[in-house]
Amino acid sequence: MEQRDEEDFAEYFAARRDAVRRSAYLLCGDWHRADDLAQTAFVALHRRWRKIRDRGALDAYVRRTLVRAVIDESRRPWRRERFVEELPETPLPDGELGDSVATRSALLDGLRAVPPRQRAVLVLRFLEGLDVAATATALKCSEGTVKSQTARGLTALREALGGTLDDLRSAS
């Protein structure tokens, strides 16, 4: 890569690193995996940096690479194994989720229970703020697929959250 290309990539990386890492965390629910997934996305971008002509499409390219990495990783057999440490449950005061940290934690726990592709759609649509068309572009699928995956993902999230969903609605 030429020196100017390296500098441009370094600027883009510095500006977007935290946002991509946060998106990766929302997709996978684990900060260590999020770091690995963000790195995977930036490595893929670096490889194609000179070939990307539309610099306005960089975010979309990284987002798509990130989502595909999450979905691909979830298909690997060793990811299906779950090693869960039993931690003592600490009840919230009065059993309510009024605290924003508890609400966020409940939402993230619920997202972890949603299948990867549906989780990707929910994160892109509702946490990243993309519309149906932009989500379809990011995932390279039809808008109808985005709509059906959104409906299924919301159903799965509701089931995962159980009675917590009403508390989440009232807290927002």
Image (cartoon, rainbow, N blue to C red):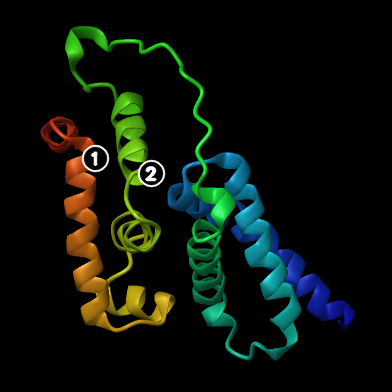
Q: How many marks?
A: 2
Mark sitting on residue 160: 1
Image quadrant where one finds the C terminus? top left
Give yes or no for contact between labels 1 and 2 (Cβ–Cβ under 8 Å): yes
Q: Which residue is mark 2?
A: 112
Q: Mark 2 is on which residue type?
A: Arg
Image position, residue 59 (x, y; %):
53, 71
Mark sitting on residue 82: none
Residue 15: quarter of image:
bottom right
Residue at 53% x, 65% y is 72
Residue 7 as seen in the image, left or right of residue 111: right
Residue 130: quarter of image:
bottom left
Measure how far apart labels 1 and 2 are at the Cα level: 9 Å
Badge 2 marks a residue whose secondary structure is helix
Residue 138 as seen in the image, left or right of residue 50: left
Residue 135 as seen in the image, left or right of residue 21: left
Q: Mark 1 is on which residue type?
A: Ala
Q: Is residue 81 above or below residue 115?
A: above
Q: For this rendering, which residue is in front, 4 or 26?
A: 26
